[in-house]
Image: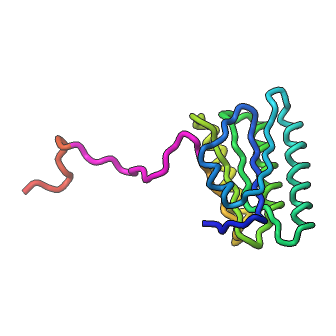
Amino acid sequence: MLENSDELMSIVVLEAGAAWPPWLTEYQRLAPNAVVIAQAAAESADSFQARVLHRVAEAASNCGVRARARIRVGVIVSVDSPAEERVALRQNVARALLKAMGTGHEAELVLAGDSEELEASRQHLFELAGTLCEELGGSLVNVRVRFSSSKSGVMRSVSPSSPDVEPLASKA
């Protein structure tokens, strides 16, 4: 897990209609200086993106002024929408957060889905995470995907066979 410091910052980006994830407090403990940017219900995706990119750049420049300060955690909480403008917004914001965090130290970007995600929305978040991981190469930055409604744990990949079905072994 990442180390805690009062000099570390987290940036949380909430799309309009997204709920605050209950697990977010664990990240705030790691990077207690938080910037939260929430989209207004009537705000367009383009306007929100411009506002987020400006605020992320501003936070990064403030970190540059303070020698030990840095952005440690970035979180994008998305809503159930695979619309192209939403996908583009998430890509651009994620890349801006990664640029602001830098790659020379441990950091974490979390792509979060809100509540009961549509399968297409989940797929887009996983695709984005894969693309970002490829771009990051051997850096110290982790990219995670989380869903608010999902519980942690191990899921079975193979179902146990039913008791009425005989095994495929030959009969002797």
Of residues 91 and 34, the one drawn nearer to the viewer in this rendering: 34
Q: Nearer the viewer, residue 25 or 144?
A: 25
Total label count? 0
Between 88 and 16, which is closer to the camera in this rendering? 16
* Residue 112 colored in magenta in the image: no
Q: Main secondary structure of the magenta part?
A: loop
**Percent coordinates x, y for residue 64 in the rendering:** 90, 66
* 54 versus 117 height, above or below: below
Q: Among all residues in the image, which is located at the extreme front?
A: 6
Residue 3 spot, x, y in % from top left: 66, 68
The residue located at (78%, 46%) in the rendering is 36
Q: Which residues are magenta?
A: 147-162
For image coordinates 45% across by 52% down, the residue present is 153
Q: Residue at x 65, y 34 (%)?
A: 80
Q: Position of residue 1 (x, y in %)?
A: 60, 66
Query: Residue at the top extreme?
Result: 42
> 149 left or right of 47?
left
In this rendering, does residue 36 appear at all?
Answer: yes
Q: Quadrant of residue 116?
A: top right
Picture quadrant of residue 129: bottom right
Q: Position of residue 67 (x, y in %)?
A: 87, 72
